[in-house]
Image: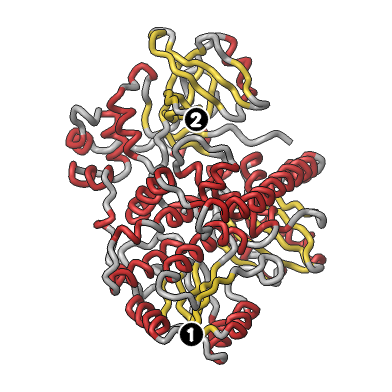
């Protein structure tokens, strides 16, 4: 079986020229203005708001349905010195949310605890065990974060035990809402809050913002927790637009200028010596926080994030880092085993989906391995292992394909499942595995479109390397933070050659210095991660085309410009399509 299919390159639609003209001026060249207009930024006022995200532009938290009820219930609990339990999921979003709310409420009361469910014995969301623990502690109020929107039976159980619930969630609700004191979720059909894409930690922040407003606490004290919101926004892959852009912008500034002890300890463990961006949170901080819940217990991550000083953080950080090292090893070994299994199965060579099972695989890492297999073979993928006598696992998808729907088509074979378009979890009796594999393949073949079987790179603009100037670089710098909804722009450079410095770095990465043959004085360092297979083409001297992002490489305090090469194709013609409808027909060279 071959590796992932060749990528299709698709040029974004060009915006109206008059919109580009309005945004173009001395400090914003036409190339940058075009990119801004493509992202819906029209006019200088919108551009100013985009480039200078302001805390004052955050929405009034009381616009969220049930916010007044939530604040009133917390105020009553604080006034009566009731025991409060802060309850959250074991992933990055849940643990950062728990750290944020626990830390903020601790300034008002010492009668507070937090609870993270065990991934393996309790599973996702509110558990009966957690409610029982709250009752044993004498808690009369649980604030649930990043979970609870479908916990109708659990909230009813808590009510019977004299415990009230405030739910802060950002997932889609079911047919009925839990009978909680307050249900804060912008995705409620009856909630008119203007921004729907907050992370779970973002919802927790809005609750604390409302509490602060109610008590006359200023923005400065609120800003002190935005580092946690930025981490959750990055790692939960929510759009970095609107309110999230403001929160991420100020949170990143805090992370870089004055990181809390726990984050500083993780940065030390990861040997980070540069300013953090969204990508660094996703690939450096996030995996360490997540590893606690995957390998040991999510409580460990919250304790690290709440550490009061460096000494306390340094005592916990090695445990978290050790879990991450173990997670990496499991990930590497399981991925290699899965790839070998796929390569050795002729039936899978013709399949449109991937379903692999091994009873020895670690349950906490199957989702990561599923993502690796999608990267390699680009098809809807389910990775399963055995737990408690059942087949359990995770699914991941390709762009535009709803893997949750495909799993739903097999629901009669499953004991439970949940998730969303791009990621889902499932449990089934072992005996149903062969039938599930067959049915899932049928569901994928029935629903997937031809263009969804080919990986695609979106191209913002065709731009010669010698057209990169200071004005463009300055605008790109100020367009950060980058992330979903505001990805780092990708440019097409046709007919480039290597200046003679092509070499392999690491095992699979290609380092070059690129230029156009007719403009040799304008050459740029470039790195193509995991693209060593293009070495012969690059060294041949023949012109080729690249997709590239412009990045500033910060190495030991020295900042240099570097092109991050997303993909390479031989030649200069037929490398680009501008319309997905005829993409498959025009993408061969």
Which of the two residues, 570 or 441, is positioned nearer the viewer here? 570
Quickly name the residue at label 1. 164
At which x and y percent is residue 281? 50, 46
Could you tell which of marks 2 and 1 lies nearer the N-terminus?
Answer: 1
The residue labelled by disc 2 is: 586
Which disc, if any, is residue 574?
none
Q: Secondary structure at mark 1?
A: strand
* Residue visible at 45% across and 67% down in the picture: 101
Q: Is residue 326 left or right of residue 525?
A: right
Residue 42 location (% of width, % of height): 22, 44
Is residue 450 visible to us here? no
User: Which quarter of the picture shows residue 154?
Assistant: bottom right
Q: Residue at x 53, y 28 (%)?
A: 567
Q: CA distance from mark 2 to mark 1?
A: 60 Å
Residue 272 lies, in percent from the top left, at 53, 38
Q: Is residue 252 above or below residue 101?
A: above
Q: Residue 520: give x, y in percent of width and height.
A: 41, 8
Could you tell me which secondary element the residue under label 2 belongs to? helix
Closer-to-camera residue (127/545): 127
């Amino acid at each position: 079986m071959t590796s992932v299919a060749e990528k299709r390159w698709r040029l974004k639609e060009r915006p109206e020229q008059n919109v580009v003209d309005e945004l173009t001026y001395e400090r914003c060249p036409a190339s940058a203005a075009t990119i801004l207009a493509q992202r819906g930024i029209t006019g200088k006022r919108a551009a100013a708001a985009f480039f200078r995200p302001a805390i004052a532009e955050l929405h009034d938290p009381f616009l969220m349905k049930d916010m007044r009820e939530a604040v009133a219930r917390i105020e009553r609990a604080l006034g009566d010195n009731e025991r409060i339990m802060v309850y959250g999921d074991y992933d990055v979003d849940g643990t950062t949310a728990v750290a944020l709310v626990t830390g903020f409420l601790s300034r008002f009361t010492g009668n507070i605890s937090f609870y993270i469910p065990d991934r393996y014995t309790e599973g996702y969301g509110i558990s009966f065990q957690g409610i029982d623990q709250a009752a044993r502690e004498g808690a009369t109020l649980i604030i649930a974060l990043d979970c609870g929107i479908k916990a109708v039976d659990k909230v009813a159980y808590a009510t019977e035990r004299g415990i009230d619930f405030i739910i802060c969630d950002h997932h889609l609700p079911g047919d009925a809402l839990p009978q909680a004191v307050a249900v804060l979720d912008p995705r409620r059909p009856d909630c008119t809050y203007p921004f729907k894409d907050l992370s779970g930690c973002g919802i927790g922040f809005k609750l604390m913002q409302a509490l602060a407003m109610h008590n006359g606490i200023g923005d400065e004290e609120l800003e002190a927790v935005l580092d946690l919101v930025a981490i959750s926004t990055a790692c939960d892959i929510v759009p970095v637009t609107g309110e999230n852009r403001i929160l991420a912008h100020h949170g990143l500034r805090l992370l870089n200028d004055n990181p809390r002890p726990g984050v500083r300890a993780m940065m030390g463990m990861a040997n980070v010596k540069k300013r953090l961006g969204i990508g660094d949170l996703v690939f450096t901080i996030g995996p360490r926080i997540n590893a606690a819940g995957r390998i040991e217990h999510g409580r460990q991550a919250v304790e690290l994030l709440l550490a009061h000083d460096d000494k306390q953080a340094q005592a916990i950080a090695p445990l978290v880092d050790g879990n991450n090292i173990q997670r990496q090893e499991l990930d590497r070994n399981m991925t290699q085993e899965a790839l070998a299994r796929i390569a050795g199965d002729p039936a899978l060579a013709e399949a449109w989906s991937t379903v692999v099972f091994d009873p020895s695989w670690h349950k906490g890492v199957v989702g990561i391995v599923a993502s690796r297999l999608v990267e390699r073979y680009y098809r809807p993928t389910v990775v399963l292992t055995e737990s408690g006598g059942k087949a359990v696992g995770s699914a991941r998808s390709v762009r535009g394909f709803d893997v949750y729907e495909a799993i739903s088509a097999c629901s009669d074979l499953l004991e439970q499942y949940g998730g969303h378009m791009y990621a889902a979890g499932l449990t089934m009796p072992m005996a149903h595995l062969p039938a599930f594999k067959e049915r899932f393949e049928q569901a994928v073949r029935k629903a997937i479109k031809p263009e969804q079987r080919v990986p695609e790179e979106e191209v913002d603009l065709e731009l010669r390397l010698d057209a990169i100037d200071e004005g463009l670089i300055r605008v790109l710098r100020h367009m950060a933070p980058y992330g979903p909804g505001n990805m780092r722009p990708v440019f097409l450079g046709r007919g480039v050659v290597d200046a003679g410095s092509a070499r392999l770095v690491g095992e699979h990465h290609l380092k070059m210095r690129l230029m156009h043959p007719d403009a040799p004085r304008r050459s740029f360092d470039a790195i193509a991660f995991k693209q060593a297979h293009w070495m012969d083409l690059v060294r041949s001297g023949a012109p080729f085309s690249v997709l590239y992002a412009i990045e500033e490489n910060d190495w030991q305090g020295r900042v240099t410009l570097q092109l991050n090469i997303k993909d390479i194709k031989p030649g200069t013609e037929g490398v680009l399509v501008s319309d997905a409808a005829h993409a498959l027909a025009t993408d061969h060279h």
